[in-house]
Amino acid sequence: MVSASAAGDMKFFDLRKAELPYLEVEAHKNSLSAMAVHRYAPFIATGTSKQYIKVFSLQGEQLSVIRYHNSFLGQRIGPVSALTFHTYKVYLAAGATDSNVSIYSGDRGTA
């Protein structure tokens, strides 16, 4: 089981020995606002109100970061308020407080 707090830490528990986590990861410094775990693929995503999304392995290793940046097309990511993975595919949907939804794919150019 994986839990996360607004302080930015994630804790991994073995339910057979649930009194202490077997792994703790500082996902963000603070302001963690959303977390999602893929049902079948070994991925966990966390998002913050400071416009960051990080993707981790089930071993707590950070795999990628999606950051806020401006471009000629406009803002790319807002303050994250919701995250969810597609049930079977490796797609991540991120809802932001600016009323935008972004969809990210594990493969470049497929989403």
Image (spheres, helix red, strand yellow):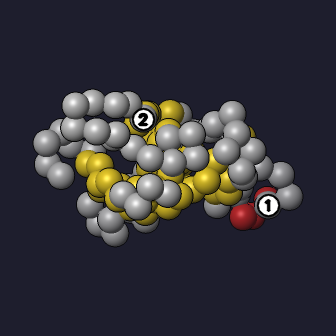
Numbered disc in front, either 1 or 2: 2
For residue 27, which quarter of the picture?
Answer: top right
Residue 19 picture location, percent across and down: 86, 58
Residue 3 position (above or below residue 107): below
Helix, strand or loop at mark 2: loop
70 or 91: nearer the viewer = 70
Instruction: Tell me the distance, in whole angstroms, between the alpha carbons under discs 1 and 2.
Output: 36 Å
Answer with the quarter of the image where residue 84 lies: bottom left
Mark 1 and mark 2 lie on one chain; the one further toward the N terminus is: 1
Q: Amino acid at mark 2?
A: Tyr
For disc 1, the marked residue is 18
Q: Which residue is disc 2 drawn over?
A: 68
Q: Residues within 10 Å of mark 2 (few under 14, many from 20)?
A: some
Horizontally, is 109 left or right of 56 in the view?
left
Q: Amino acid at mark 1?
A: Ala
Can the viewer see residue 27?
yes
Residue in view at x 79 percent, y 61 percent = 18
| Spot occupied by residue 74 in the image (x, y as percentages of width and height) | 28, 39
Relative to 82, 19 lies left or right = right
Residue under the point 63% across and 36% down: 28
Give the left or right position of residue 50, taking residue 31 as reference.
Answer: left
